Amino acid sequence: MKKAKDMLIQAGLSESQVNTKVVDGSRSAAKDILEEAESSKCGTIVLGRRGQSGVKEFSMVSVATKVLEGAGSMTVCIVQ
C-alpha cells in the first residue's frame, strides 16, 4: 500500500488526496470499498489486482464488477 501511495504522490497527487485503508475479515469487500468511498466523498477508486489464477482471480473479478456497478459517478481504475 505504501508503494502504491508513493507512486500516486510521485505522479502529482498531494498526500492529502491519497487515502488508504486496510480492513481484515470483511464479508463483502466490494460493499466495504463502496461505503468507504462514499463516506469519504472519493472521486476515484483504484483497485489493485495481482496475476492470480483460479478462485482468487474469480473473486477479484467479482469484487471489481460489484465496485464498477455500484460506483455511481466515481471513477474506478483497476491496476495490475
Image: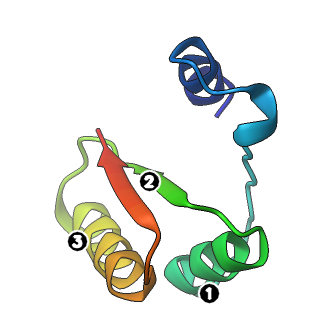
Query: Which residue, given by chain and number where applicable, does mark 3 sit on?
Result: 58
Whole-Å distance between the Cαs marked 3 and 1?
16 Å
Q: Residue furthest right?
A: 16
Residue type indicated by callout 3: Phe
Query: Is the image coloured rainbow, by chain, by secondary structure, or in one colour?
Result: rainbow
Residue under pointer 1: 27
Disc 2 or 1, which lies upstream in sequence?
1
Q: Amino acid at mark 1?
A: Arg
Q: Tell me the quarter of the image containing the N terminus.
A: top right
Three-letter code for the amino acid on which mark 2 is drawn: Leu
Q: Secondary structure at mark 2?
A: strand
Residue with the mark numbered 2: 47
Q: Secondary structure at mark 1?
A: loop
Q: Residues within 10 Å of mark 1 (few under 14, many from 20)?
A: few
Question: Do callouts 2 and 1 mark residues in contact (Cβ within 8 Å)?
Answer: no
Circle count: 3
- Looking at the image, residue 29 sits to the left or right of residue 79; the answer is right
Tell me residue 16's x, y (percent): 81, 36
Q: Residue 79 shows which numbered tag? A: none
Using a 10 Å C-alpha cutoff, classify the residue at mark 2 as few (fewer than 14 neighbours), some (14 to 19) or many (20 or more): some
